[in-house]
Image (spheres, rainbow, N blue to C red):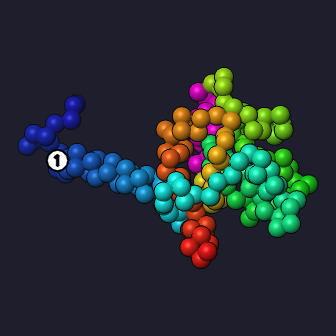
Amino acid sequence: RPFTMSSDAEPGSRWLPALATLCLAGVWWWHSESAPQGLGGGAGGGGGPLSSVPTYSLATLRAFDGEGADGSLLLAVWGRVFNVTSAPEFYAPGEGYHVFAGHDCTRAFAISSTKEKWLDKDLEGLKPKKILHLNDTYWGTYVEKYPIVGRLTDPPYDAAAYDAYAGPYAQIRVHESVRAAAAET
């Protein structure tokens, strides 16, 4: 029987549309609150104009492969630079994902490859299915676990073209620890 709002409807069913609307509003609110944090690198992300976001070129990013003096491990996905230093069991020299440290990994993650030849590459020719896989990896792994600490100035693709997946590139938000360090200087 189709949904009706007549007086002969089952008790409580008049509230069903209101409950559905409330649920949808809650999901929208949660997403609108969590997505910007994700753009900011997970819990504690905050904002600021793009000009205040630390920048890295592909060349400068390469210095953060865990082999430098401070041992920092950074990688980029969709133009966002993540600090993965908290996971040396994956990204440190000698570990399985060390190949990613110091590189833009967007294409490699989209095609689920650990081959160095797919690092720092454009996204030309990727099927929508691969872009969706990348989206799951981005939100489910990187945004959830690692802080965004900057943005690439020269990603090998137009990062803003993927705003529908990763959020607005022009509004990248870095982790609060980055903002705090910048405020101290």
Residue 137 covered by magenta stretch: yes
The one of 181 and 10 positioned closer to us in this rendering: 181
Quadrant (top left/top right/bottom left/bottom right) for the C terminus: bottom right
Residue situated furthest bottom in the rendering? 184
Residue 47 image point, x, y percent: 48, 61
Task: Please tell me whether residue 169 belongs to the stretch shown in magenta.
Answer: no
**Relative horizontal placement of residue 101, taking residue 39 as reference (left or right):** right
Q: In the depicted view, which residue is nearer to us: 139 or 68?
A: 68
Q: Which residues are magenta?
A: 128-142
Return the x and y of residue 51 as percentages of the image width and height: 53, 55
Compared to residue 127, the image places residue 60 above or below, namely below
* Rendered residue at 79%/56% (across/down): 64
**Numbered circles on residues, count:** 1
Quadrant of res 127: top right
Q: Please, which residue is most extreme toward the top here? A: 125
* Residue 1 % position (x, y): 22, 31
Q: Residue furthest left?
A: 7
Above or below residue 54? Residue 156 is above
Q: Which residue is mark 1?
A: 14
Q: Quadrant of residue 162?
A: top right
Query: Which element type, helix, strand or loop, lies under badge 1?
Result: helix
Main SS of residues in magenta: helix
Question: Which residue type carries mark 1?
Answer: Arg
Q: Residue at x 13, y 40 (%)?
A: 5
Q: Is residue 133 visible?
A: no
In terms of depth relative to the viewer, which is nearer, 148 or 22?
Answer: 148
Q: Residue 32: horizontal and vertical position, in percent?
A: 41, 53
Residue at x 59%, y 70% (from the top left corner): 182
Residue 166 in view of the camera: yes
Residue at 60% x, 54% y is: 143
